[in-house]
Structures are given as structure tokens and as C-alpha cells.
Amino acid sequence: MWKSLHRAFPTMDELFKRCSAPNSTCPICHNQDESIEHLLLLCQRVEPVWFGGILNLKIDRDTVSSWVEWVLSFSMEHGSPNYDKMALLSYVAFSCWHIWEARCNFLYNNCQINPTQVLCAISNSARAFFEVVRRNPNPSDQGTVAIREPMWFTPPTMFTKINIDASWSAPACSGFVGVVLQDADGFFVAATRHAIRAPSVGAAEMMAILKGCEFGLALGLQKVLVESDSFDSVCSLSESLEMGGWEAFPSLAKAKRLGESFQDCRWSWIPSSANMTTDSLASQQYTEM
């Protein structure tokens, strides 16, 4: 199985062995041979994808001997009742696919690898897959397992996570923004709430992201992970501002500029079911904090 997996993956290392490549060096980092382990786990361009996603994995280079052994070890480590093994392994599979896709786009289309864009693509694919599984009326009949609800995860070391959300009333064109900050240990740092006026729900969500950036800068934070359940807003900030609606564009542009003021700012999508604390803070039902 292991040998067949190696042959199926046209890494530079494998192509070099077949005399189909001039060398076996990784075309991205140019530091090591591009084995399947290096491509999917160990390359420096891959590290932010693993610890920046919902798995929050920090790959230990010294313990990775083979891809298969790493997957088996991961499966056993997360095999407790508190985790859904199928959901986690599905997320790992989507992560590997989009890492490979980003590598190919870099190699053949001269597209620079943006970890945040890769994370957005992984989240989108995983979300669509999990929704299909949840809609299955008889999962036991087809051998599938129940998917656990999405969870909030702590940010990488030295980062502060800024969770934001917005509520919006169409008749009044107004609402509230909630911002909650937590550190890498999951401890509460600060929170704030603002009343806003916005022409659309998309504009309200972008105002929330803007308020989150302003709050983080006011507190003097250096490394932040700004997390929103507005997938369109996160993708617009990660990929291209032109992807956002015109009503949200002014806030998008301001948030993008503010993000560049941090030493390191990353944009992340989170399901609304895992963002309930901020959702409650932004709810119009609560007129006071």
C-alpha cells in the first residue's frame, strides 16, 4: 500500500527516480527533496495551513517518518469519544488535496501560495461535504458516521484570536457588532460591542471585521487571527477585494489596510455554530452588554 501510494503521487522525488525530472528538490522551498511527507506535511509553505486551520496542528518534524504512519498516529491520537474520527480525517483529506492543488498552481501557473486562501478552500470543501453527510436521512444504512458539530479552536502560539459577528435589521438598516478576543491558551482577553448602521447584511458583517481590527490595534496586538462566520467577507479579504459586494467594499478596503498594520494578520472563516459567544454579544435582543 505504501509503495503504491508513493508511485501514485508524482512528487519531484518520485519523478527523479523515474528519470522524468532533473532533480528531486522541492520546487517551492528549494531546501529538501520533495517526498510525499515533505510535500504534504514538512514544507515551510505547508506549516501555516496545518496550524492555521480548525485542527490547529503543529507538525513535529522529528516524528514524521512516513505519511501513512503519520495518518495512523493522528487517527489514534484523536480517537477519543470527544472527537469524530471520520470528520477529522475528512478534514485532513481536504487539506491534503488543496495543498497539492496549491503546489500545482504554483508550479504550472506561477500562482503564489497563500496559506489563507488554501484554508478558505479547505473550509469551503469540508463545509459542503459535511452538509451533504448531515442531510443523509439514514447515515447508518450507508456506513457513514455522525459528524460532530464544529468547534472553536485556540489560535497559534503568540496569536490572539479576534472573533467577530454582526446582527442586522433590514427595516431599520441598523444592528450591532460584537467582538471577542481570546489568546493562544483560550483565555478571555477583551470584548466590545458597537451599534452600527449598514445598508445590507454583507456590509454589516464587514463593519464587524473592521471594528475587530480597530479593537485589536487599539490594544496593541501584533499577531492576530480575525475570525468571522461571513465566508464571502473572509474570501474577499484573503483573495481579492473585488469579490465582495459594492456596499461592503469601503469597509473591506479599510479592514485590509488595517490588517497590514499588524505584524501578522490572518483571516479565517468559522461556522456560525462555533461562533455563538460573539453571536450572542452582537444579538439585537441584548441592548446592554
Image: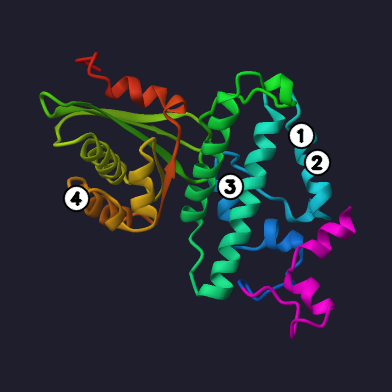
Q: Which residue is mark 4?
A: 246
In three-dimensional space, the C-alpha distance between marks 4 and 3, rounded to whole angstroms, equals: 33 Å
Q: Which comes sooner in the sequence, label 4 or label 3? A: 3
In three-dimensional space, the C-alpha distance between marks 1 and 2, rounded to whole angstroms, equals: 6 Å
Mark 2 neighbour density, 10 Å: few (under 14) some (14–19) many (20 or more): few
Q: Residue furthest left?
A: 172
Q: Which residues are magenta?
A: 1-27
In three-dimensional space, the C-alpha distance between marks 4 and 1, rounded to whole angstroms, equals: 46 Å
Rendered image: mark on residue 77: 1
Secondary structure of the residue carrying tag 4 is loop
Q: Which comes sooner in the sequence, label 3 or label 2? A: 3
Foreground tag (4 vs 1): 4
Q: Can residue 156 be seen in the rendering of this structure?
A: no
Q: Are marks 4 and 1 in contact (CB under 8 Å)?
A: no
Q: Which residue is mark 2?
A: 73
In three-dimensional space, the C-alpha distance between marks 3 and 1, rounded to whole angstroms, equals: 16 Å
